Image (cartoon, rainbow, N blue to C red):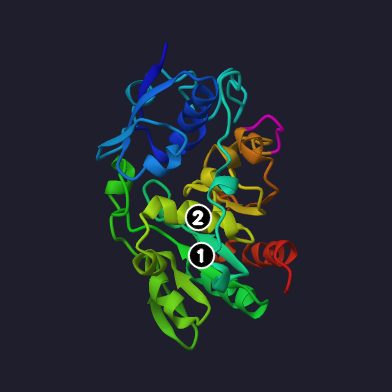
Amino acid sequence: MKINLEIFPEFASEMVLSIPYAYYLHEMGKLGKLLVCRGMKPFYYFADDVTEVFQYRSLDNKSALKGIPNQWLHHSNGEDGVIDYSEWKVPPYEEHFKNNMFDNLKPYVIVNNIYNEPWLENGCFDIKNLYDIFVYLTEAGYNIVYKRPTNKEFAIDGNEYNTISTNIMGEVDGIGVLNDYQLCDYFKNVININKIWKETKLDYSTLNLSLFSETDGFITPAGAGSQLFAFYKKPLLMYLTRGREVSRYGYLNNNDCYYRKLANTPLHLLYDDFNTWEGNPNNRKYNELLDLIKKVFRSK
């Protein structure tokens, strides 16, 4: 008997809980009809019957993950980041979406960012972070694809709705006050992913899946859709300032954590708990972050 699913949870839960279950069903010959969120059909490339019907995501997992074995992203049996893997298989995005569309960009690094409730300033790369990252990577011989959605590109949840089109602002010595998109324009070799989207005319999800298949690696805050990056066997550098991954020791170091199960991705972690900043972002571990980036992404 075929199993039909209606899938509309927050993005991270869909990546970790819904998609591997659907792919498992596909491999077992049991996958039926899928009803998914706007923009998500490419993630289910393996399914024969997929319809995008949901315009918004729900934060209520009981309804949005109905019929899916794992109902909670962080654990199934009390262990952080460890879920039930008995009906769970990861689709090979890197292999399926491999392409030569972005050869002119190589080598390039995806620098991902977020500015959504409840993360805001405590969870994102600020302008100082971004400026230092851009300077090092471009001088080291990399191009950069900067990704921070405006939250208009895809179906969003209630948290994302509150920060549509909000910009990260900051001052750069000798330049002035800029938002993060303007900072991209200041650098010759930094490209806003939305500009590539406009030029390629691909749908947003296919663009992301294809770009990620050819990159040299990822730099991202925790959260921010970073679960998707873990589907690729590429270096994944994560800057962790808040969330369960920070508050619970060993969360990401457990070999059974879903981050490590998705593709055995090389994880490079920097913990910088925002509670230790004492209200002063200048207490952030800026130098340690840059040192780790230099270690992971060496000069070409």
Q: From this viewpoint, is residue 277 visible?
A: no
Q: Earlier in the sequence, mark 2 or mark 1?
A: 1
Quadrant of the rendered structure where residue 53 is?
A: top left
From the image, tell me which residue sits under label 1.
Answer: 101
Instruction: From this view, report whether residue 156 is shown above or below residue 172.
Output: above
Q: From this viewpoint, is residue 188 visible?
A: yes
From the image, tell me which residue sits under label 2.
Answer: 210
Q: Viewer-nearest of labels 2 and 1?
A: 1
Which quadrant: the C terminus? bottom right
Q: Residue 88: percent from the left, percent from the top?
A: 56, 25
Q: Amino acid at mark 1?
A: Met
Q: Residue 91: percent from the left, percent from the top?
A: 55, 36
The residue shown at (59%, 68%) is 108
Q: Amino acid at mark 2?
A: Ser
Q: Is residue 254 magenta?
A: yes
Instruction: From this view, report whether residue 111 is shown above or below residue 59.
Output: below
The magenta stretch is: 253-257
